[in-house]
C-alpha cells in the first residue's frame, strides 16, 4: 500500500445525522489544526451551516459536489491542483454508497486516514427499518460510529451490538446534549455471569458474543456453555474449530458468522457444519485468526452433538 501523503477524513451519515455539527466543532479545535491547507468537500446540504469566516481563519477551503456522477477522480485531482491541500475532509452524501467511494481511484498520494459515521439516535430505528442496506454499507469499514441526540430509554446497548455485528473493530460512542455517555453498558446480562457454568441460551448468544468481545477480561477463567454450528477453517490445526452462529447484517444474503476459536481433542471427530453443544473455559491468546492480535480462545471441556436450533440466526432486537 502506497504511503498516504494527503490524509482523507471521511465523514458519513444520513441527512441531519449531525455530520455538519460534528465537523463545525472538530475543524475549530486546536488539536485538529495543521500548518497547511485543509480542503473540505461537501456533498450534501443540511439545516446546519458552516461558519465560512471561521473556516477561513483555520486555513480551510470549501468545495461542493452535489451530484454523485460529479464525484470523480478527475474532479478530485483538479481540486488538488488548485488548492494543494495538506489534508482532505469529506462530508459524504448519506444516500451515496460508501462502497463506491472505496472502489474509487483517488489522486496520487491520497488515502483514507479515518472514517467516522454520525448517527441520529432518534431516527436510527426508522433508517434501519427502511434503509438498512445503505446504513450497513456505511458502517462496514468505518473506524468510529457516533450516536448523537441520545435520550434516556433508548436501547443503546442493542444499537451497539448491531454495529458490532457489521464491523467488530468499529469504536461506538454515544452522546446526549451534555456530551459523551459512559455508563450505558452497565445493564444486567440475561445470564448469570457468576455461575459455575454460564449457560448462554440461544436467544442470548449475540449479546454474549459482543460483550465477550468488548470485555474479555470479564469471562477469562470462567466456563461457558452454548450451542452452535461448527466450522473448521483450513490452517487452524487439527485440534481447533470455531463454534458459532450466523447473524444477518443487512439482508438474508448478507450474513456474518459469529464465533470464537475453540480447542478440543474431539475436533477431528466433528463434521464441518454440524451442531454441537460446547462447554469450555474462556482464555485469551494471540491467534492468526485474530490478525495476530489477542482474542478469546475457548478450551473445550465437553463437545457434544446436538440438534440444530429451530432458528440459527442471531438477533439483537
Image (tube, grey):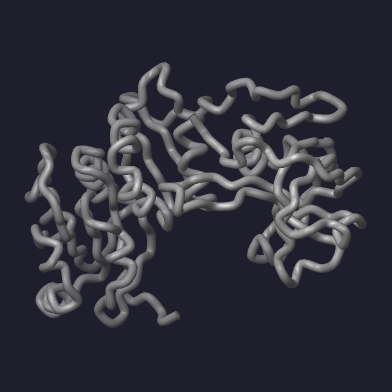
Q: Residue at x 25, y 79 (%)?
A: 107
Residues 315 and 143: in front is 315
**In the image, farthest residue toward the top:** 153
Q: Residue 312 occupies which quadrant of the picture?
A: top right
Q: How many marks?
A: 0
Location of residue 36 in the rendering, given as x and y in whole percent from the top left corner: 23, 68
Q: Residue at x 24, y 39 (%)?
A: 18
Image vertical order of residue 272 relative to residue 26, above or below? below
Q: Residue 119 occupies which quadrant of the picture?
A: top left
Q: Residue at x 45, y 53 (%)?
A: 253
As drawn, is 169 to the left or to the right of 126? right
Residues 40 and 235: in front is 235
Q: Residue 174 occupies which quadrant of the picture?
A: top left
As drawn, is 23 to the left or to the right of 241? left
Location of residue 64 in the rendering, given as x and y in whole percent from the top left corner: 9, 59
Q: Residue at x 59, y 24 (%)?
A: 186
Location of residue 236 in the rendering, given as x and y in whole percent from the top left corner: 76, 67
Image vertical order of residue 244 relative to residue 127, above or below? below
Q: Quadrant of the N terminus?
A: bottom left
Image vertical order of residue 296 relative to residue 178, above or below? below
Amino acid at each position: 500500500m502506497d504511503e498516504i501523503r494527503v490524509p482523507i477524513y471521511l465523514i458519513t451519515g444520513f441527512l441531519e445525522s449531525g455530520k455538519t455539527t460534528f465537523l463545525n466543532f472538530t475543524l475549530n479545535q486546536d488539536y485538529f489544526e495543521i500548518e497547511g491547507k485543509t480542503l473540505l468537500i461537501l456533498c450534501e446540504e443540511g439545516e446546519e451551516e458552516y461558519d465560512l469566516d471561521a473556516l477561513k481563519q483555520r486555513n480551510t477551503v470549501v468545495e461542493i459536489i452535489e451530484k454523485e456522477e460529479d464525484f470523480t477522480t478527475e474532479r478530485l485531482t483538479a481540486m488538488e491542483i488548485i488548492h494543494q491541500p495538506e489534508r482532505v475532509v469529506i462530508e459524504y452524501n448519506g444516500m451515496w454508497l460508501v462502497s463506491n467511494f472505496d472502489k474509487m481511484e483517488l489522486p496520487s498520494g491520497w488515502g483514507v486516514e479515518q472514517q467516522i459515521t454520525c448517527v441520529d439516535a432518534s431516527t436510527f430505528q426508522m433508517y434501519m427499518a427502511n434503509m438498512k442496506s445503505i446504513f450497513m454499507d456505511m458502517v462496514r469499514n468505518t473506524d468510529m460510529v457516533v450516536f448523537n441526540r441520545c435520550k434516556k430509554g433508548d436501547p443503546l446497548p442493542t444499537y451497539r451490538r448491531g454495529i458490532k455485528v457489521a464491523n467488530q473493530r468499529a469504536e461506538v460512542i454515544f452522546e446526549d446534549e451534555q456530551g459523551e455517555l459512559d455508563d450505558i453498558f452497565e445493564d444486567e446480562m440475561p445470564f448469570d455471569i457468576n455461575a459455575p457454568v454460564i449457560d448462554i441460551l440461544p436467544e442470548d448468544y449475540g449479546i454474549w458474543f459482543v460483550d465477550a468481545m468488548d470485555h474479555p477480561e470479564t469471562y477469562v477463567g470462567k466456563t461457558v456453555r452454548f450451542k452452535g454450528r461448527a466450522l473448521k477453517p483450513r490452517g487452524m490445526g487439527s485440534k481447533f474449530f470455531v463454534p458459532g452462529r450466523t447473524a444477518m447484517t443487512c439482508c438474508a444474503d448478507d450474513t456474518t458468522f459469529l464465533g470464537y476459536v475453540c480447542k478440543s481433542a474431539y475436533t477431528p471427530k466433528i463434521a464441518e457444519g454440524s451442531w454441537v453443544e460446547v462447554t469450555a473455559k474462556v482464555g485469551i491468546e494471540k491467534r492468526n485468526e485474530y490478525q495476530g492480535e489477542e482474542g478469546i480462545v475457548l478450551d473445550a471441556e465437553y463437545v457434544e452433538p446436538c440438534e440444530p436450533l429451530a432458528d440459527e440466526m442471531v438477533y439483537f432486537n
